[in-house]
Amino acid sequence: MIMQLQNLQRRIFNIKSKTDFWETTFEVFNYQYNNNTIYHNFLKSLGKGCSKIKTPYEIPFLPVEFFRNHKIVTGDLPVEIIFESSGTTGITTGKHFVNDLLLYEESFLRSFSLFYGEPEEYLIAALLPSYMEREGSSLVYMVDNLIKKSRNPYSGFYKNNIEDLIHTIKKAKEEKQKVLLLGVSFALIDLAENQSPDLSGVIVMETGGMKGRRKELTRSELHSILKGKLNVLSIHSEYGMTELLSQAYSKGDGIFYCPPWMKIIIRDPQDPLTLYNEPAGTGGINIIDLANINSCSFIATGDLGKVYEDGGFEVLGRFDNSNIRGCNLLVE
């Protein structure tokens, strides 16, 4: 099994075409069917054995809610870390049992490099107060790793040091350095409304909702405020979840794109087992994350969205707005 796993991991990060993706997807599906007890039992309860899955659009997706009450693992490797989702009081949070942190690091570093180049090229500043206040955040782990890779002495988490942040960015701009400011939405709004610094030329990236700190905004409202107050042409976004090992990125207008080993499929909002194999109307977002091979690579989220002809996708909200969670949740 170890050799099979290693071969699959090599294939996942060397996908060059749609054919490569779907062939690898079927291999990962078969591997998880045979080695993931929770996913196997879920498929059996649906009467969906491997022999009955003939096309990728027949693969059942595990509801993300399973991560709240089950240990979702494939194989029997020891757990290295447990990432835990954020959540409001009274809501059971999801837990992702990760047994290969190097795999997670390879996934987010490859993805970042694909969309933005090497982290060494940037001064990376983070405003993630709600995530820094708790343990087990996969987002904090990723950003901390990117900050260390940046090799810039002024890269870091600027939780309460807003004046230092503004001064650092101003100096970096004067020195013609690339700057990435990544923050949770309410922290960026606070920065914009309270300080309104000139961040022209800076990549400003939001990672999600207000977490109960402020009134929820639509993505278009949030981006309009940030662009105006921070003097930037576009707002970038990151779409990720505790239960995944991969991220999608948007460089503006809320349209996200996935790395080659990740794909979004829209499901019928009235029938969760029916998947659209062509760009269609709004429906539930299902995610194939092949890097998540040691957990579950086929997850049905609570997000609503749509996919476009070029493979980009848009997040339009949630099925249940009362349960706000995840790294990127804005009500549309």
Image (cartoon, helix red, strand yellow):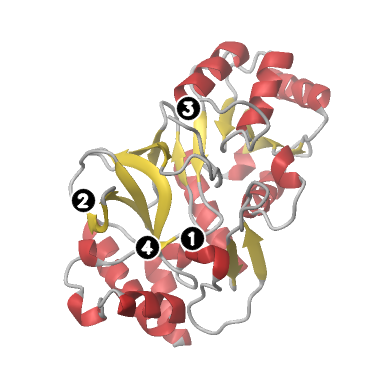
Q: In this view, does 10 lie to the left or right of 149?
A: left
Q: Is residue 173 visible?
A: no
**Mark earlier in primary sequence (2, 3):** 3
Q: Can residue 166 be seen in this view?
A: yes
Spatial separation of the CA atoms under disc 2 and disc 4: 26 Å
Circle 2 sits on which residue? Answer: 276
Circle 1 sits on which residue? Answer: 65
Residue 56 in picture, x, y percent from top left: 23, 64
Crowding at dot 1, Cα within 10 Å, few <14 / some 14-19 / many 20+, comes out as some
Which is closer to the viewer, label 3 or label 4? Answer: 3
Circle 4 sits on which residue? Answer: 14
Residue 17 in picture, x, y percent from top left: 25, 57
Identified by mark 4, the residue type is: Asn
Check disc 4 and report its element: helix, strand or loop: loop
Circle 3 sits on which residue? Answer: 219
**Mark earlier in primary sequence (1, 3):** 1
Identified by mark 2, the residue type is: Tyr
Residue found 64% across the figure and 46% down from its top: 88
Front-most of residues 142 and 88:
88
Identified by mark 3, the residue type is: Arg
Identified by mark 1, the residue type is: Glu
Q: In this view, does 35 lie to the left or right of 56?
A: right
**Mark earlier in primary sequence (2, 4):** 4
**Mark earlier in primary sequence (2, 1):** 1
Spatial separation of the CA atoms under disc 4 and disc 1: 30 Å
In this rendering, is residue 119 above or below 301?
above
